[in-house]
Image (cartoon, grey):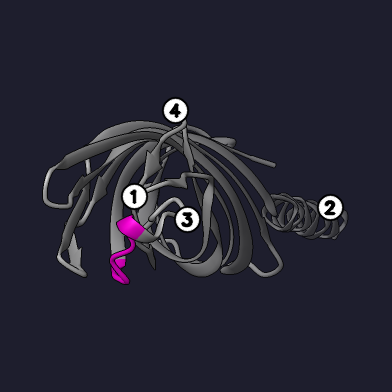
Amino acid sequence: MKNRILTVALSLALLAAAAYAQEGQRNEATVSALGSFQQTTNGNGIQQSGNNAAGVLVSYRYFFTNHQGVELNYGFSRFDQQFNLPGALSVPANTNEATASYVFKWGIGHGLTPFASAGTGAFAFVPTNSFTVNGASASTFATPDFVYSVGTDVAVNRRLTLRLGYRGHVLEAPDFNVPGLYTGSVAHIAQPFAGLSIHW
Protein backbone atom coordinates (compact mmCIF):
# COMPACT_ATOMS: atom_id res chain seq x y z
CA MET A 1 0.00 0.00 0.00
CA LYS A 2 2.76 2.40 0.93
CA ASN A 3 4.55 1.59 -2.31
CA ARG A 4 1.40 2.36 -4.32
CA ILE A 5 0.92 5.67 -2.51
CA LEU A 6 4.58 6.54 -3.06
CA THR A 7 4.34 5.63 -6.74
CA VAL A 8 1.20 7.74 -7.23
CA ALA A 9 2.72 10.69 -5.34
CA LEU A 10 5.92 10.47 -7.36
CA SER A 11 3.97 10.29 -10.63
CA LEU A 12 1.90 13.34 -9.68
CA ALA A 13 5.04 15.25 -8.74
CA LEU A 14 6.66 14.44 -12.08
CA LEU A 15 3.53 15.48 -13.99
CA ALA A 16 3.34 18.73 -12.03
CA ALA A 17 7.02 19.43 -12.70
CA ALA A 18 6.57 18.77 -16.41
CA ALA A 19 3.49 20.99 -16.55
CA TYR A 20 5.31 23.75 -14.69
CA ALA A 21 8.25 23.53 -17.08
CA GLN A 22 5.93 23.71 -20.06
CA GLU A 23 3.94 26.59 -18.61
CA GLY A 24 7.13 28.34 -17.56
CA GLN A 25 8.52 28.62 -21.08
CA ARG A 26 6.47 31.65 -22.01
CA ASN A 27 9.35 33.81 -23.23
CA GLU A 28 11.41 33.65 -26.41
CA ALA A 29 14.25 35.86 -27.66
CA THR A 30 15.58 35.49 -31.21
CA VAL A 31 18.37 36.98 -33.30
CA SER A 32 18.06 36.33 -37.04
CA ALA A 33 19.82 37.15 -40.29
CA LEU A 34 17.48 38.20 -43.08
CA GLY A 35 17.40 39.18 -46.71
CA SER A 36 15.31 42.08 -48.06
CA PHE A 37 13.77 41.95 -51.53
CA GLN A 38 11.61 44.90 -52.55
CA GLN A 39 8.94 44.67 -55.23
CA THR A 40 9.25 47.06 -58.19
CA THR A 41 6.46 49.67 -58.24
CA ASN A 42 5.32 52.28 -60.74
CA GLY A 43 3.44 55.56 -60.36
CA ASN A 44 3.41 59.12 -61.68
CA GLY A 45 5.74 58.06 -64.49
CA ILE A 46 8.37 56.83 -62.02
CA GLN A 47 9.62 53.27 -61.65
CA GLN A 48 10.97 52.45 -58.19
CA SER A 49 12.78 49.41 -56.80
CA GLY A 50 15.30 48.42 -54.15
CA ASN A 51 18.46 46.38 -54.49
CA ASN A 52 18.64 43.08 -52.60
CA ALA A 53 20.27 43.39 -49.19
CA ALA A 54 21.05 41.56 -45.95
CA GLY A 55 20.03 42.66 -42.48
CA VAL A 56 19.40 41.62 -38.90
CA LEU A 57 16.18 41.02 -36.95
CA VAL A 58 15.81 40.93 -33.15
CA SER A 59 12.56 39.52 -31.76
CA TYR A 60 10.93 38.90 -28.39
CA ARG A 61 7.81 36.79 -27.88
CA TYR A 62 5.60 36.28 -24.86
CA PHE A 63 2.96 33.53 -24.93
CA PHE A 64 -0.09 33.99 -22.72
CA THR A 65 -1.32 30.47 -23.64
CA ASN A 66 0.49 27.44 -25.04
CA HIS A 67 -0.36 28.57 -28.57
CA GLN A 68 -1.08 32.33 -28.59
CA GLY A 69 1.24 35.20 -27.89
CA VAL A 70 2.57 38.61 -28.86
CA GLU A 71 5.80 39.48 -30.63
CA LEU A 72 7.97 42.62 -30.69
CA ASN A 73 10.49 43.09 -33.50
CA TYR A 74 13.30 45.43 -34.41
CA GLY A 75 14.91 45.04 -37.82
CA PHE A 76 17.76 46.81 -39.58
CA SER A 77 19.07 46.61 -43.13
CA ARG A 78 20.66 48.86 -45.71
CA PHE A 79 19.77 48.93 -49.37
CA ASP A 80 19.52 51.44 -52.19
CA GLN A 81 16.23 52.87 -53.41
CA GLN A 82 16.42 53.17 -57.17
CA PHE A 83 14.30 55.59 -59.19
CA ASN A 84 13.87 55.92 -62.96
CA LEU A 85 12.51 59.44 -63.35
CA PRO A 86 13.47 59.37 -66.43
CA GLY A 87 17.12 59.37 -65.60
CA ALA A 88 18.47 57.09 -62.89
CA LEU A 89 18.76 58.04 -59.22
CA SER A 90 20.08 55.66 -56.56
CA VAL A 91 19.55 56.58 -52.90
CA PRO A 92 21.51 54.57 -50.28
CA ALA A 93 19.35 54.23 -47.18
CA ASN A 94 19.31 52.52 -43.81
CA THR A 95 15.99 50.91 -42.90
CA ASN A 96 14.65 50.54 -39.38
CA GLU A 97 11.59 48.49 -38.48
CA ALA A 98 9.68 48.45 -35.19
CA THR A 99 6.60 46.21 -35.16
CA ALA A 100 4.26 44.33 -32.84
CA SER A 101 2.34 41.22 -33.89
CA TYR A 102 -0.06 38.55 -32.72
CA VAL A 103 1.54 35.12 -33.12
CA PHE A 104 0.06 31.62 -33.13
CA LYS A 105 2.15 28.45 -32.87
CA TRP A 106 1.36 24.75 -32.78
CA GLY A 107 3.52 21.66 -32.32
CA ILE A 108 3.45 18.88 -34.92
CA GLY A 109 6.04 16.57 -33.37
CA HIS A 110 9.57 15.64 -34.41
CA GLY A 111 10.82 18.87 -32.80
CA LEU A 112 8.92 21.11 -35.24
CA THR A 113 6.74 24.03 -34.12
CA PRO A 114 5.19 26.01 -37.01
CA PHE A 115 4.00 29.58 -36.41
CA ALA A 116 2.17 32.41 -38.13
CA SER A 117 1.92 36.08 -37.16
CA ALA A 118 0.37 39.35 -38.27
CA GLY A 119 0.74 42.86 -36.93
CA THR A 120 1.66 46.47 -37.54
CA GLY A 121 4.22 49.10 -36.71
CA ALA A 122 6.51 51.58 -38.42
CA PHE A 123 9.15 51.30 -41.13
CA ALA A 124 11.68 54.11 -41.64
CA PHE A 125 13.98 54.75 -44.59
CA VAL A 126 16.92 56.97 -43.60
CA PRO A 127 19.04 58.34 -46.49
CA THR A 128 22.74 58.05 -45.75
CA ASN A 129 23.61 61.00 -48.01
CA SER A 130 21.93 64.39 -48.37
CA PHE A 131 20.50 65.20 -51.79
CA THR A 132 17.92 67.39 -53.48
CA VAL A 133 15.54 66.88 -56.40
CA ASN A 134 14.16 70.00 -58.08
CA GLY A 135 15.19 72.02 -55.04
CA ALA A 136 13.50 69.71 -52.49
CA SER A 137 15.80 68.25 -49.83
CA ALA A 138 15.48 64.59 -48.83
CA SER A 139 14.78 63.49 -45.26
CA THR A 140 13.87 60.36 -43.31
CA PHE A 141 10.71 58.73 -44.62
CA ALA A 142 8.64 56.87 -42.00
CA THR A 143 5.48 54.99 -42.88
CA PRO A 144 2.96 52.63 -41.23
CA ASP A 145 3.82 49.01 -41.87
CA PHE A 146 1.62 45.90 -42.06
CA VAL A 147 3.76 42.84 -41.39
CA TYR A 148 3.05 39.12 -41.50
CA SER A 149 5.16 35.98 -41.15
CA VAL A 150 5.11 32.20 -41.38
CA GLY A 151 7.80 29.74 -40.37
CA THR A 152 8.81 26.99 -38.02
CA ASP A 153 11.03 26.43 -35.01
CA VAL A 154 13.29 23.36 -35.14
CA ALA A 155 14.28 22.12 -31.69
CA VAL A 156 18.01 21.90 -30.93
CA ASN A 157 17.40 21.16 -27.26
CA ARG A 158 14.84 22.11 -24.62
CA ARG A 159 15.93 25.76 -24.52
CA LEU A 160 17.28 26.41 -28.01
CA THR A 161 15.61 26.29 -31.43
CA LEU A 162 16.57 27.13 -34.99
CA ARG A 163 13.98 29.49 -36.46
CA LEU A 164 13.33 29.51 -40.22
CA GLY A 165 10.72 31.77 -41.75
CA TYR A 166 9.42 34.30 -44.20
CA ARG A 167 8.22 37.82 -43.41
CA GLY A 168 6.36 40.25 -45.62
CA HIS A 169 5.93 44.03 -45.27
CA VAL A 170 3.18 46.02 -47.00
CA LEU A 171 3.86 49.76 -46.90
CA GLU A 172 3.92 53.00 -48.84
CA ALA A 173 6.80 53.22 -51.30
CA PRO A 174 9.35 55.69 -49.86
CA ASP A 175 9.87 59.07 -51.50
CA PHE A 176 12.11 60.63 -48.81
CA ASN A 177 9.59 63.50 -48.60
CA VAL A 178 10.62 64.71 -52.05
CA PRO A 179 7.59 65.46 -54.29
CA GLY A 180 9.57 64.57 -57.41
CA LEU A 181 10.06 60.99 -56.13
CA TYR A 182 6.45 60.36 -55.08
CA THR A 183 4.88 57.36 -56.83
CA GLY A 184 1.77 56.93 -54.66
CA SER A 185 2.40 53.18 -54.79
CA VAL A 186 2.15 50.42 -52.22
CA ALA A 187 5.34 48.37 -51.97
CA HIS A 188 5.93 44.84 -50.74
CA ILE A 189 9.21 43.80 -49.12
CA ALA A 190 9.89 40.06 -48.79
CA GLN A 191 12.25 38.93 -46.02
CA PRO A 192 13.29 35.30 -45.67
CA PHE A 193 15.14 34.82 -42.37
CA ALA A 194 16.97 32.30 -40.20
CA GLY A 195 18.04 32.64 -36.59
CA LEU A 196 18.48 31.13 -33.14
CA SER A 197 15.87 31.36 -30.38
CA ILE A 198 16.26 30.97 -26.62
CA HIS A 199 13.19 29.84 -24.64
CA TRP A 200 12.63 30.32 -20.92
Q: CA distance from mark 1 to mark 4?
A: 33 Å
Q: Secondary structure at mark 4?
A: loop
x 63%, y 64%: residue: 70
- Answer with mark 1 or mark 4, whichever residue precedes in sequence: 4
Location of mark 4 (residue): 129
Q: Which of pointers 1 and 4 indicates the residue nearer the eye? A: 4
Q: Position of residue 170 (x, y in %)?
A: 37, 66
Location of mark 3 (residue): 177
CB atoms at circles 1 and 3 under 8 Å apart? no
Which residue in the rendered view is the most extreme toward the right? 2
- Answer with mark 2 or mark 4, whichever residue precedes in sequence: 2
Which residue in the rendered view is the most extreme toward the left? 86
Q: Label 2 sits on what residue type?
A: Leu
x 32%, y 48%: residue: 191
- Answer with mark 1 or mark 2, whichever residue precedes in sequence: 2
For the residue carrying disc 1, how many other residues have a C-alpha within 10 Å: few (<14), some (14-19), or many (20+)? some
